[in-house]
Image: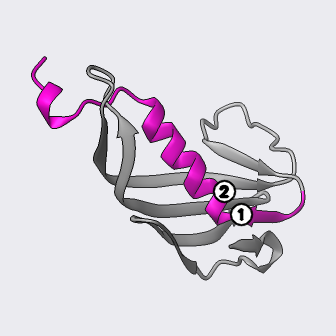
Amino acid sequence: MKITLRKVGKTPLDFEVKSGEMTFKGYLQYDANKLILLKAKLSGKISTDCDVCAQEFKLNVDEDIEFFISDGIYEKHEDALLDVVESFDSTVDLEELMNSEIELIKSDYNSCENCKDI
């Protein structure tokens, strides 16, 4: 699901993207200085490998996601500590953002129920 950033205004634009057992649901809202706030919840189950025993298992995911999307190159301000994704074609692909967040979760240290106490 691609959204043109120029269509995002002060009124929140709701979205919901599903893939397999995962749901990425939230809104986009214009903030300031070509920045668009994305606030969402990523929830469901993903298949990943246990970092202890290497067995595949289903990981429950319930993550709050919040970052900014810049329409073009982000000009960092001195006192601003923002998590910013840059868009160079004035669009945002929500499925791609969801998949990126899933890959970040998978790259973390994950252990199955059998290995939790090891």
How many other residues sit within 10 Å of disc 2, few (<14), some (14-19) or many (≥20)? few
Which x, y percent locates residue 5?
78, 70
Find numbered disc 1 in the image and state the secondary structure of the residue it sits on.
Answer: strand
Residue type indicated by callout 2: Glu
Q: Are marks 1 and 2 in contact (CB under 8 Å)?
A: yes
Q: Which residue is mark 1?
A: 93
Q: Is residue 50 magenta?
A: no
Quadrant including the N terminus: bottom right
Task: Establish if 87 lies above or below 77.
Answer: below
Residue at horizontal 70 percent and vertical 78 percent from the top = 9
Element under disc 2 = helix
Give how far across and how far down residue 70 sits, in percent: 76, 53
In percent of the image, x 86 and y 64: which residue is there?
90
Magenta span: 89-118
Residue for badge 2 = 96
Quick check: 105 left or right of 55? right
Left or right: residue 8 compared with residue 105: right
- Name above or below for residue 1 compared with residue 54: below
Residue 53 lies, in percent from the top left, at 26, 22
Residue 108, x across and y down, in percent: 41, 30
Q: Amino acid at mark 1?
A: Asp
Indicate how the structure is coloured in the image: one colour
Instruction: Give the residue furthest to the left.
Output: 117
Rounded to the nearest whole Å, what is the CA distance between mark 1 and mark 2? 5 Å
